[in-house]
């Protein structure tokens, strides 16, 4: 009966996913295999689950620098942040705390073993702790845009996460200039087949879900930063993040990690044509949100 219940949960997760983004179908069809895989991983490896003190999750938007930040945090000796696991998908499908943790640890080792290259960028940091750990105090997953999609589909997903994980939560909300986010999303979203208006609407649906979540969690669970801020003051912002996760901000780690950050943010907004009325629309809609309203809305 337990197996049948799990299959039923996975079918429910598939149905839910189809309701908000059809491209999730492939991932959902793989859920039964990952359920079995996570059970095997748990039975064959002894993970240090009892040492874990906090769970970290990224909240945000595609192409906002999550991969860079996640990889830098993963280089800390007491932190493991997996790359693009999409842990909330497994939570929704009924996976246990231990199964999710085993998938996070396995995913991190695999990504590191493959060189930590993603969308043409190298995120590897030699000599630090990516793909391994010393004392596992913080565990989590980097899937910012995907996490926001789950929030849209299941607004109570954070409470379900809190109940299953049974650890204090640490939510990292990374914001990038809306025009850059929207432009990149427009270009990359299913080969650019969607209109600019659809990209704008999709972006603000995520913004609304994230803004709502911010009002529902404790201040100590939420850390907000901008992509531009992270590039301008990499070491200082990274120190803030590490202290937010309540692990030691070692100077040698901070110095090495900060060296990996790009010199300047990419202005993706300049790679597409922006009708002035669309720029004005984004500027107007951004004024509703404290974390967006201070941006200047210009192109070129």
Image (tube, helix red, strand yellow):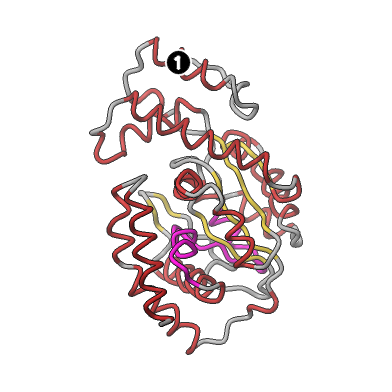
Name the residue located 68 percent from the left edge and 72 percent from the top edge. Answer: 52
Q: Observer-nearest residue: 222 or 138?
A: 222
In the rendered image of this protein, does residue 278 appear above or below residue 211? above
Point out residue 173 in the picture as x, y percentages from the top left corner.
60, 43
Point out residue 265 in the picture as x, y percentages from the top left corner.
51, 33
Magenta region, residue range: 70-95
Quarter assignment of residue 228? top right
Quarter assignment of residue 53? bottom right
Residue 260: say if magenta: no
Task: Check disc 1 and report the residue beneath it.
Answer: 281
Name the residue located 45 percent from the left edge and 25 percent from the top edge. Answer: 179
Name the residue located 69 percent from the left edge and 69 percent from the top edge. Answer: 137
Quadrant for the N terminus, please: bottom left
Q: Is residue 274 left or right of residue 211?
A: left
Quadrant for the C terminus, please: top left
In the rendered image of this protein, does residue 206 appear above or below residue 164? above
Tag 1: Cα neighbours inside 10 Å, few (<14), some, or many (≥20)? few
Point out residue 20 in the picture as x, y percentages from the top left corner.
37, 45
Q: Observer-nearest residue: 201 or 266?
A: 201
Name the residue located 66 percent from the left edge and 73 percent from the top edge. Answer: 136
Q: Observer-nearest residue: 243 or 209?
A: 209
In the rendered image of this protein, does residue 198 appear above or below residue 261? above
Residue 83: say if magenta: yes
Secondary structure under tag 1 reads helix
Pick out the residue farthest to the front: 1
In the rendered image of this protein, does residue 154 appear above or below residue 263? below
Pick out the residue farthest to the bottom: 44
Point out residue 17 in the picture as x, y percentages from the top left corner.
36, 52
């Amino acid at each position: 009966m337990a197996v049948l219940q799990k299959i039923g949960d996975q079918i429910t997760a598939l149905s839910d996913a189809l309701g908000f983004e059809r491209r999730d179908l492939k991932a959902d069809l793989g859920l039964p295999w990952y359920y079995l895989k996570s059970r095997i991983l748990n039975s064959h490896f002894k993970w240090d689950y009892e040492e874990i003190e906090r769970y970290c999750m990224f909240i945000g938007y595609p192409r906002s620098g999550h991969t860079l930040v996640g990889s830098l945090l993963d280089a800390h000796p007491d932190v493991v942040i997996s790359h693009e696991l999409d842990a909330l998908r497994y939570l929704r499908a009924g996976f246990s705390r231990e199964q999710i943790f085993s998938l996070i640890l396995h995913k991190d080792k695999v990504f590191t073993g493959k060189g930590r290259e993603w969308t043409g960028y190298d995120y590897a940091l030699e000599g630090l702790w990516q793909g391994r750990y010393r004392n596992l105090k913080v565990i989590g997953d980097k899937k910012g845009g995907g996490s926001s999609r789950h929030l849209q589909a299941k607004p109570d997903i954070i409470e379900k996460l809190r109940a299953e994980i049974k650890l204090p939560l640490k939510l990292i909300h990374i914001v990038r200039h809306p025009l850059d986010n929207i432009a990149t999303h427009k270009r990359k979203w299913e080969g650019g087949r969607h209109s600019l208006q659809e990209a704008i609407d999709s972006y603000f649906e995520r913004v609304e879900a994230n803004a709502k979540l911010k009002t529902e969690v404790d201040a100590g669970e939420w850390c907000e930063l901008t992509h531009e801020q992270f590039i301008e003051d990499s070491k200082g912002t990274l120190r803030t993040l590490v202290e937010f996760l309540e692990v030691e901000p070692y100077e040698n780690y901070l110095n090495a990690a900060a060296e990996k950050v790009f010199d300047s943010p990419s202005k993706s907004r300049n790679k597409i044509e922006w009708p002035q009325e669309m720029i004005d629309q984004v500027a107007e809609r951004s004024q509703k949100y404290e974390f967006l309203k201070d941006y200047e809305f210009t192109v070129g």
